[in-house]
Amino acid sequence: MVTFHLFSLTLLLSLPLPVASRIEAAFLQNSPAALRELFVTDGTIPVSLPEPLSLADQLSPDQAFLVFSHIFSVVRTTEFTTDPRLSALPGVPGGVLKARWSFRNERTGNQYPFRVYFFIVPTAPSPETAVRGPSASFRIVEIRAERL
C-alpha cells in the first residue's frame, strides 16, 4: 500500500503542472494580473527577492500584486523557464517549482539572472469546477529568489 502511494506521488510530481505554464506566461508577459490569479487568496505570502529588487516581507495577495505591478513596470523579462519537475517536501502538501528568471532594468539597461523558487500547494476546487469533475489546482504560497 505504501509503495502504491509512493509510486502515485512520484508519478504525479513528474507530470508537467499547468501552474508552471501559467507562472511562465505571467512573467514572460510581465503581467501582475496573471500572477495575482495564482496567489493564495487568504493569509500572507512570504516574498524574498535579492538586489536589485531588494524585498523581504510577508505580503497579502493584494500587496504582492502591487509589488509585482511595480517590478514589472521597471523591468522587462528577457527569459523565464521552469524546471518541469516539482521538488516535494516530506510531509508537506505541494512542493517547490524552480525557475530561471532573467530581466532587464528599463531605466539602467542592466540585466540580472535569478533562480526563483515558488512554493505551491494544491487547493480545493471551487464549486463551479467541482461540478465539471475532479481537477487539481495549485496556488503560490511563497516566492524566494537568489541572484545567479
Image (spheres, rainbow, N blue to C red):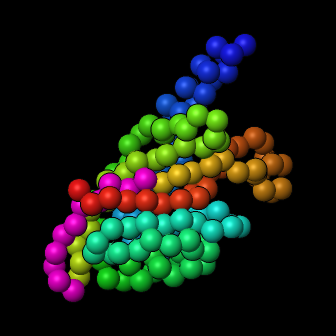
Q: Position of residue 84 (x, y in %)?
A: 42, 40
Task: Identify the residue shown where x is 32% and y is 58%.
Answer: 146
* Up/down of 9 relative to 100, above or below: above
Q: Is residue 40 visible?
A: yes
* Up/down of 83 relative to 56, above or below: above
Tell whether position 112 is magenta.
Answer: yes
- The span picked out in magenta is 107-117
If the image is split into quadrants, where does the N terminus sit?
top right
Task: Identify the residue shown where x is 63% and y is 41%.
Answer: 92
Q: Position of residue 60 (x, y in %)?
A: 62, 74
* Up/down of 5 relative to 68, above or below: above
Task: Identify the residue shown where x is 17% and y is 83%.
Answer: 108
Please indicate whether residue 109 sits to the left or right of residue 81 in the image. left
Q: Position of residue 27 (x, y in %)?
A: 40, 65
If the image is split into quadrants, where does the C terminus sit?
bottom left
Q: Main secondary structure of the magenta part?
A: strand
Residue 26 picture quarter: bottom left
Task: Identify the residue shown where x is 38% and y is 67%.
Answer: 49
Question: Closer to the camera, 28 or 52?
Answer: 52
Q: Is residue 21 visible?
A: no
* Up/down of 14 relative to 146, above or below: above
